[in-house]
Amino acid sequence: MHSPSLCALIVTSLSVQLTEIFAINNVSHYNVFETAWSWSYVNYTWPSTEAYLTALATLRYVPENVMLAGPRIHNGKVYVAMPKFRSGVPATLGYFNILSSEAVNTLITPFPSWEKNTPEDCGSLQSVIGMEIDRYGIMWVLDGHRASNALSGLQCPPKLVLLDLNAGGAVRHVFSFPNEICLTDGGFLNDIVIDDVVEIFAYITDNSPIDPGLIVYSLGKNKAWKFRDATMFPDLSAPNYLLDGSLVDVLAPIDGIALSPFTRKSPRTLYYTSLTGHGLFSISTAILKNENSLKDQKWRGLVKPVGQKLCSTDGMVMDSNGNLYYGLLCLSGVGKWNVFEPFEISEVIYSNPSTMVWPDGFTIDFDGNLYLLSNYAFRFAGNETLYFSPDVIKFRIHKLHDIGGVNYMYNTFERY
Ligand SMILES: *[C@@H]1O[C@H](CO)[C@@H](O)[C@H](O)[C@H]1NC(C)=O
Ligand SMILES: *[C@@H]1O[C@H](CO)[C@@H](O)[C@H](O)[C@H]1NC(C)=O
Ligand SMILES: *[C@@H]1O[C@H](CO)[C@@H](O)[C@H](O)[C@H]1NC(C)=O
């Protein structure tokens, strides 16, 4: 009696039992990563049909080349980045409305405007992959993907652009990184966290294959400095893995970062990991904030190896309770660890090789929902012409309801 339907029945009843077991332990909600939005290609809210058709005809817009990254949520809008790994990406930053949108192939509106996304102007956004929104509604945009300047033909320095979301995205500040901090040709500002309790600092990963490191930017001093260490390089011993039929053998440096919540007891801790490497590392922000730490080598001894993850990781985020959620690329899944516990009891809370291919950007909204975007980034960033058939879903924003905490910036200061 091994008919397919019986097998299906057994599998179904097994999963029902598992669900019940999970429910008993009250972790059932971990399994409910719902797909909130998905795309087989990215299209925009064009000013006119004519503009759309012209962009298509002139290859200014090549739909299959547009990749989504880094969602951030604020005041009913979901902001996304569209890094220019390939040609034909007409706008690199945009948003859609949470409520009024379709769940599939939602159109993206360029942000702050089409004009501010003009590729021919270094003053406009060139190629964005990451951003963060601070507690005052300022979006810190990393316009710092400079691995492929050849696409625009321009040599624009990487920059940090502060946009005021309470004023339609008005530009409040721009900081251009000097070449010795982030390379104009070959820099790759990738991920950012904001530490704004007393003075305001941003910690930024530079995923540059040439000069990787951890950049600290002080808003008060309007100055940046950079920590470079072996722990920020790709780990050559990390195994390759198969994803969707492709062998992923990328060698890439420091990428994902997360910041622990503020406590009165001790300075916050910054966590980081290389895109190639299972090691998770931490360093105290007291060291990072002090530019003089770089005057000698002592700080290197204060980098702590936290533990070994099961896979390499791209994005991660910490909530206000110190729970670190991180992507597990080789499992197409998500790991969770509470920083107040030993790393050994970290757990895999989700894995789905058919829907969560390359969990990339993570974020948490004000209501305590965790969102992450999976995007097949390895296919866009590599130089392989691995195109998908048009109807394949390439980008998904997954939502995990009610994780019991909010974004790391918003803890209640009295908690610890
Ligand atoms: C289970 O978890 C949910 C969500 O965190 C919570 O609302 C509920 O009270 C929990 N139930 C029990 C029995 O602990
Ligand atoms: C792209 O969006 C425009 C509206 O901005 C629409 O007119 C056009 O039909 C869309 N194209 C596709 C292929 O979805
Ligand atoms: C990518 O491949 C194409 C075709 O083989 C080649 O012309 C191009 O130089 C390559 N680009 C990079 C960045 O390696």
Image (spheres, rainbow, N blue to C red):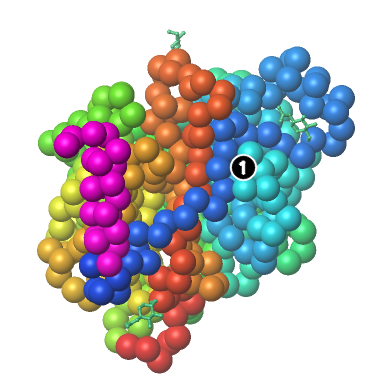
Q: Position of residue 81 (x, y in %)?
A: 57, 44
The reply to whether residue 138 is visible in this rendering is: no
Look at the magenta stretch and give its main secondary structure: helix
Q: Which residues are magenta?
A: 1-20
Quadrant of the frame with the C terminus? bottom left
Q: Residue at x 68, y 30 (%)?
A: 90
Q: Pick whichever, 218 or 382, lies toward us.
A: 382
The reply to whether residue 113 is visible in this rendering is: yes
Q: Which amino acid does the dot numbered 1 rest on?
A: Val
Q: Pick whichever, 7 or 269, lies toward us.
A: 7
Q: Position of residue 78 (x, y in %)?
A: 62, 55
Residue 181: say if magenta: no
**SS type, badge 1:** loop
Q: Residues within 10 Å of mark 1 (few under 14, many from 20)?
A: some
Q: Position of residue 267 (x, y in %)?
A: 32, 77
Q: Residue at x 87, y 25 (%)?
A: 50
Q: According to the image, label 1 marks what residue? A: 104
Tell me: residue 349, above or below residue 110: below
The image quadrant of residue 87 is: top right
Q: Pick whichever, 176 or 282, lies toward us.
A: 282
Quadrant of the frame with the N terminus? top left
Q: Residue at x 77, y 39 (%)?
A: 45
Quadrant of the rendered image holding ligand 3: top left
Q: Residue at x 15, y 66 (%)?
A: 345
Q: Pick whichever, 93 or 374, lies toward us.
A: 374
Tell me: residue 10, above or below residue 218: above
Among all residues in the image, which is located at the extreme front?
Answer: 1
Among all residues in the image, which is located at the extreme bottom?
Answer: 414
